[in-house]
Amino acid sequence: MSTFLYFFFGMLDSIAVFILIFKTFRWPIRHYWIEILISGGLISFLSYVNRIIFYIPNWDMTLQFLAYISLLMWMFRVNLPNAINLAAIGYLAFVGIQFIVYPLLLAMGIVNLDDAQELTGAGTYIIQVSSEIACYSVSYLIWKLNIGFSYVSQPPHDRFTFFKIKGNRFAYISNVVGVLVVCSTMYWVFNYVHGQFVVLGSVWGALVILLVLSYRRDYGYD
């Protein structure tokens, strides 16, 4: 039963990331719902293998992030530069929301510190479900308020086009920073009791930078 719940909630987590990406960049979900479900299942399975079978939880987010990039390229046919950018924004948004939800649950006494480090259990599932509801709600608000970006066209793209992005140097550096933040998240969470609070600032800092750059590109400032 714990295996099924891990896979199920992990799949909902992954779907939430894709929905955040799609709504942030104004892509129609209904055209890609099969690809989203398949991708969510694959990433959930990858996470299960990383954490339960090989027991390498510190590497889980790094490998998941690479999987998001790969799936955006091959399942959704997004080219590599955009796939990296979209994966960074979507994943950082999900992690940032999760690390806001968790302290709130902690302050209300619904979960405890250990729940953030456990792989399964009631507290862990509560954190996941609450985070998923928050992510889906944010996605709905993005759609309802008609906000988001349109500089990345709806795929298919030429996956092998490595185009030159205007203002590319800072954009690439910001993406690298976002990737490093994502990759280091699980290290802090699993090795330090209060690691999630250390991560929160860096996650939101990197996300804000990427969103500002996206805004500038959307309105032709860069």
Image (tube, helix red, strand yellow):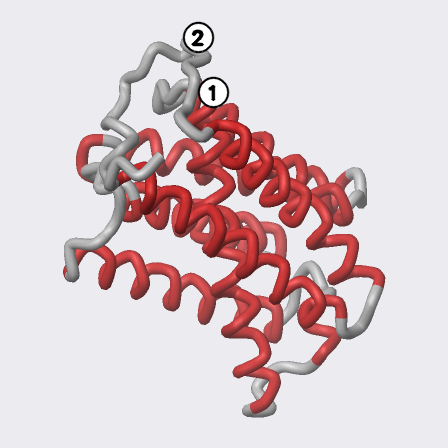
In the rendered image, the vertical position of residue 204 relative to residue 34, given as above or below: below
Residue at numbered disc 2: 160
Give the image location of residue 182, x and y in percent: 63, 47
Q: Is residue 22 toward the left or the right of residue 129 in the image? A: left
Residue name at image x 53 percent, y 83 percent: 104
Give 87 or 31, whichever is nearer the viewer: 87
Q: Is residue 13 toward the left or the right of residue 188 in the image? A: left
The kind of residue tagged 2 is Phe
Q: Residues within 10 Å of mark 2 (few under 14, many from 20)?
A: few
The kind of residue tagged 1 is Leu
Residue name at image x 60 percent, y 38 percent: 64
Give the image location of residue 84, x and y in percent: 50, 31
In the rendered image, the vertical position of residue 108 relative to residue 177, given as above or below: below
Give 129 or 25, whichever is nearer the viewer: 25
Q: Earlier in the sequence, mark 1 or mark 2?
A: 1
Q: Quadrant of the N terminus?
A: bottom right
Residue at numbered disc 1: 80
Element carrying mark 2: loop
Element carrying mark 1: helix
Q: Is residue 53 toward the left or the right of residue 116 in the image? A: right
Residue sticking out furthest to the right: 191
Give the image location of residue 199, x and y in percent: 67, 62
Give the alpha-carbon distance from disc 1 to disc 2, as whole Å.
Answer: 7 Å
